[in-house]
Image (cartoon, rainbow, N blue to C red):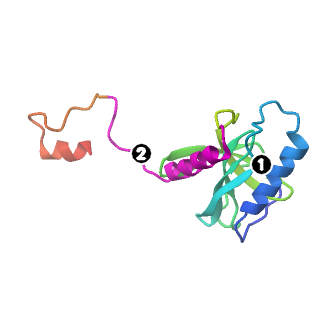
Amino acid sequence: MSFRAHQHNPAELVEQTFSRIQREQMVDVPILNPLLAVEAIDFQRWQAHWLGIVITPWCMSILLLPGTQENWVDAGQNKRRFVKFPAGDFPFLGGAEAELGEYQSCSLFSPMDRFPTQREATQTARASLIGLFSVPAAASVSGTEKPMEKPGLSRRRFFALR
């Protein structure tokens, strides 16, 4: 696998790489959504590396690219590793392309037939990034917890439920 640290935002390079993949490898693939184009969404620094989403006519994935060699965890080609975010642990698959070097991806959608416009795909990508960095609500929705106003609930038990 070729390691390449990206000092500058790799969004343009991501778009060029996935556009090439579309032209060279995905031309006759029947799952392509012809209403969508390759687009890199909101690449930003995260733990010294680059994180963003790539939209393609065949998939939408979170991408993680090395910003430095320090703290980069090599997943290995087509190997999976879990990355911890505020929303939980997400599986990322290792990959490499000549232009990008090593990267890791977490598939969000494939195929992309549920998106009737590029705008809806872009909005979904941005909402996904917001969700990735959001802490899930601690309250249970299963209904198995006792209501807090129930008689006999001590102060200690109240704080233990939170």
Q: Secondary structure at mark 1?
A: strand
Q: Residue at x 62, y 49 (%)?
A: 122
Q: Residue at x 9, y 35 (%)?
A: 152
Rate crowding at label 2 as few (under 14), some (14 to 19) or many (20 or more) other CA atoms within 10 Å: few
Quadrant containing the N terminus in the rendered view? bottom right
Q: Which residues are magenta?
A: 116-142
- State whether residue 153 is above or below residue 16: above
Q: Which mark is residue 77?
A: none
Cα separation, mark 2 vs mark 1, equals: 29 Å
The part of the image, by quadrant, that contains residue 11 is bottom right
Kind of residue sitting beneath label 1? Gly
| Res. 79 visible in picture | yes
Residue 21 in percent (x, y) is at 85, 47
Q: Is residue 128 left or right of residue 152?
A: right
- The mark lying in front, picked from 2 and 1, is 2
The part of the image, by quadrant, that contains residue 52 is bottom right
Q: Is residue 130 magenta?
A: yes
Quadrant containing the C terminus in the rendered view? top left
Residue 42 in percent (x, y) is at 62, 59
Kind of residue sitting beneath label 2? Pro
Q: Is residue 10 magenta?
A: no
- The residue indicated by pointer 2 is 136
Residue 103 in percent (x, y) is at 73, 54
Residue 148 in percent (x, y) is at 18, 38
Rate crowding at label 1 as few (under 14), some (14 to 19) or many (20 or more) other CA atoms within 10 Å: many
Mark earlier in primary sequence (2, 1): 1
Depth order, front residue of 135/80? 135
The part of the image, by quadrant, that contains residue 4 is bottom right
Q: Residue at x 88, y 38 (%)?
A: 27
- The residue indicated by pointer 1 is 95
